[in-house]
Image (cartoon, rainbow, N blue to C red):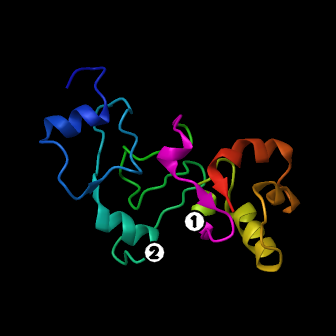
Amino acid sequence: MSSNSRVIDAIIKAGDLSDDADTSILNLSKELTDEMYIIVYTKEEINAFKDRIIPSKKIIKEIEEKIICPDTDNDACITKNDKVSSEEIGIININTASLEELQSLPSIGLTKAKSIIEYRDNNPFNSIEDIKNVKGIGNRLFEKIKDYITT
């Protein structure tokens, strides 16, 4: 691979994607680096991950890296440092999102995710602006997450 190759280039060179591949949590435009480890998941694996039923794999939520993949070793995963659109990450419903899904939002760690769940248990969110009623979520944080949430 050349020095400016991307994840998608490596996938194509390896024989391209299979019909059941799901790249929704991968950053296909990420530049390749030496010794990079790339896993392309199947649709079934992604659905199982989202449903939290992959018993043999760790469900990951590394607060510093904000990796949204079932494997910590997958260097192609979208992280908080990647500039990706809300369509690539997916819009999260703050009324139904799991603790892990909430933590995939920019600047939302374990404590704030728990606060969101605690708040919504008593006060369902009627609009995304209602999330500012959660302790610790003000205008600045709302601006960071507003494009990634829905009710």
**Is residue 35 positioned above or below 123 on the image?**
above
**Residue depicted at x 45% and y 74%:** 51
Q: Amino acid at mark 2?
A: Arg
**Is residue 80 positioned above or below 109 on the image?**
above
Characterize the local packing of mark 1: few (<14), some (14-19) or many (20 or more) Cα atoms within 10 angstroms: many
Tell me if residue 134 can be seen: yes
Would you say 24 lies left or right of 114 here?
Answer: left
Residue 124, given in percent of the width and then of the height, sits at 78, 73
**Residue depicted at x 75% and y 61%:** 112
Outermost residue on the front side: it is 126
- Judging depth in this view, the residue of 42 and 19 nearest the camera is 19
**Quadrant of the rendered image containing residue 30:** top left
Would you say 79 lies left or right of 71 here?
Answer: right
Task: Using the image, tell me which numbered label, if any, was put on residue 108.
Answer: none
Residue 139, given in percent of the width and then of the height, sits at 85, 45
User: Is residue 89 part of the magenta span, yes or no?
Assistant: yes
Residue beneath label 1, please?
100
Q: Determine whether label 2 and label 1 are within 8 Å by CB.
A: yes
Q: Main secondary structure of the magenta part?
A: loop
- Which quarter shows the N terminus? top left
**Residue depicted at x 28% and y 25%:** 5
Would you say 84 lies left or right of 42 here?
Answer: right
User: Is residue 69 part of the magenta span, yes or no?
Assistant: no
Residue beneath label 2, please?
52
**Residue depicted at x 38% and y 59%:** 71
Q: Amino acid at mark 1?
A: Glu
| CA gap, disc 2 and disc 1 | 10 Å
Question: Circle 2 sits in a helix, a strand or a loop, which is it?
Answer: loop
Q: What span is in magenta?
A: 82-99
- Which quarter shows the C terminus? bottom right
**Is residue 142 positioned above or below 71 on the image?**
above
